[in-house]
Image (cartoon, rainbow, N blue to C red):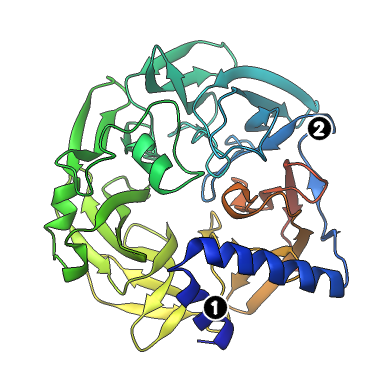
Amino acid sequence: MSMLHKINYQLNKFPTVKKAIKRTYQLGMYGLSKKIRQEGQIVKLSPNDKFEYLFGYYNISPWDVQNRYVVFLRCVNAHKSVAPSEPAEITLLDMLTNKYIIVGRTHAWNVQQGCMLQWMGPDFDKQIIYNDFRDGRYCSVILNVHSNIERVLSLPIYAVANNGQTALTLDFSRLHRLRKGYGYSNIEEVTKLDKLPDAPCIWHMDLETGEARPLLHYIDFANFETRPEMRNAEHKVNHIMISPNGKRFMVLHRWLHGQKKYSRLVTCDLDGSGMYNVSDDNMISHCCWKNDYEILAFENKKNKGIGYYIMQDRTSNYERLWPDIIEDGHPSYSPNGEFVVTDTYPDKRRVSAIRVMDGGGIHTIVRVFAPFRYDNDMRCDLHPRWSRDGKWICFDAAFEGRRGLYMVPYEGKEL
């Protein structure tokens, strides 16, 4: 681990101090550095108008199965509040006619993950699903974008199975309090006074019938292979992802003990059984399923350091990939499983990059400037995502002064 990474690791214990030092350092380095606004074969998807645009998280494709339609959010402001009170509009871009169509709106969204907007499997051609806030409750909406027929479900969604039959979700109000920019602020959290609530933290929902039931509680995680640091700590879960075959899911169990933060990766069967502790070396960040049995994650491994590792579910087997990469990012595999795309956070010049990794190395295909007003909880992560045919990579960015949606071709070339 480099000296800068050691300093960053220690400053994580003092987030307010870290933000101040980071801003001062970046302002100084930006003033001394060569300015970069954008580099790469970037094509803009969102229109040039007064609005801001975003899709949300990584590892979810905004394209339909034919790569004709792209869905994303249009909003008035995405740089002042991590979970804005004004609605965002569900926008459909017809790439054949270059027409933009507003097909719905949502009152439950945030600047990092949007409203979990995505196409519904197994066809990924007509229906989308997204979160909303109606009649005083969080919910999810299944909408046919061509007929405008919708169906409202009783719970919001976090992760959706590829077959379109099942979704998993969590407490978005608790997530908002403990991780700004990822939850929703419409309802005050009912468990805010409990560090370890005796309450559900993950729910299972049948998307065909709408039936929903609690799946796991916070105490289920705290009582599973308990560590001393979990006692008197505040617990949460985040980043649920369902395996491609819909049989297992992974989730990050995180707990805060004083100023210290801990994370581990846990996998389960879709009914909540078969819990397995895949990675438990204090720090694990962004993950994705490579296939039904392997998980790629940026994490720490004892005696190995931080980086990208491929792990086998329900085993202790792992392998480090691309040892030259020691910066966190948001990884996902291409549809054919040959490539991995990831991004970087803004460097000392406030420049973020998109990289594609394969057996031949690491290729940087995009560099964009990150304006200072998009920082900390309001940052605009690139969150790269593949098109269904693997020929394009879509990403959010703010190098033009406001959030927008862009894409870049991947042809095995780099800058």
Estimate the x, y position of residue 369 in percent, counting from the top left: 78, 58
> Which residue is rendered at x = 17% and y = 46% of the image?
272
On residue 326, the disc is 1
Along the polypeptide, which appears first: circle 1 or circle 2? 2
Query: Could you tell me the amino acid type at mark 1?
Result: Ile
Identified by mark 2, the residue type is: Pro
Residue that appears at 75% across and 53% down: 408
Residue 60 appearing in the image: yes
In the image, what residue occupies the spot 73% across and 34% down? 52
Query: Which picture quadrant has residue 96?
Result: top right
Total marks drawn? 2
Judge left or right: residue 229 versus residue 208: left
Front position in the image: 279 or 351 = 351
Estimate the x, y position of residue 229 in percent, counting from the top left. 21, 68
Check disc 2 and report its element: helix, strand or loop: loop
* Residue 363 in the figure: left or right of residue 292: right
The C terminus sits in image quarter:
bottom right
Q: Is residue 111 above or below residue 315?
A: above
Query: On the image, numbered disc 2 is attached to which residue?
Result: 47
Numbered badge on residue 71: none
Which residue occupies the extreme right position in the image? 34
In the rendered image, which quarter is residue 233 located in? bottom left
Height in image: 218 above or below 229?
above
Residue occupying image coordinates x 73% and y 27%: 94
